[in-house]
Image (cartoon, rainbow, N blue to C red):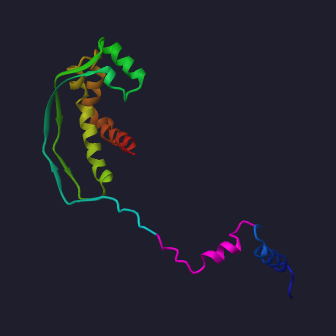
Amino acid sequence: TIDDDWLVPLLAWIEQCGEEAGGTGVPMNQVLETAGVSAIADYQSPPLPSLVQCQQLSISQVDITLWCSLQLRSLDFLPISVRKFLKLVTQSNSLTLKGAQLHLPKKQLKPRRGPVADALAPLGAEYATALFLNTSELLNRSSLNLPLAPLEFVADRSSVLGIGEVTSRITKYICQ
């Protein structure tokens, strides 16, 4: 048997095709104007992203001794509340480091290929862990008057606490 459930939608479609401004489609005059024109006539391909391919990357151990004095007003990238906290803790208008030792261990990175940011992210994560582990030395030689015992406790137990995983996640979040 033939039913007429298909006839109503077909008639509505045919009616819509004849309308100039009706429906949600493209008007017929616009279709006729663009007929025969290549869709890629003025197309320009986007620039290719820069890629890095590295088979082997070895970075020697780096030992740095830091001396610096930063005016707190020059740290305008920090929120005002953090700058005020630093002023309270340092009891001055500057943050100083006096011969702080920074030790960054030797690193071997696995082969990588991809965008520069993706290739450098593991290196940043590795060095973020090293910087965290050097925090007590940096603070000990700074103008900050903070108790170091909690940081030394965490640094001594970093392998047990999984600090590498934590700093890796923090670095990944910051880099995004």
Bounds of the magenta segment: 23-42
Residue 49: name its quadrant: bottom left
In the rendered image, the quadrant that contains the N terminus is: bottom right
Residue 85 lies in the magenta stretch: no
| Viewer-proximal residue among 130 and 176 | 176
Q: Is residue 51 above or below residue 127?
A: below
Task: Judge by depth and name the residue closer to the eye, 38 or 79.
Answer: 38
The x, y position of residue 142, in whole percent, is 23, 20
Q: How many labels sit on residues?
A: 0
Q: Is residue 40 left or right of residue 117?
A: right
In this view, the residue in front, 90 or 169, is 90
Q: Percent position (x, y) of residue 69?
A: 22, 21
Q: Residue furthest top?
A: 91
Which quadrant would residue 64 be assigned to in this image? top left
Q: Nearer the viewer, residue 57 or 160?
A: 57
Horizontal relation, residue 69 to residue 36: left or right:
left
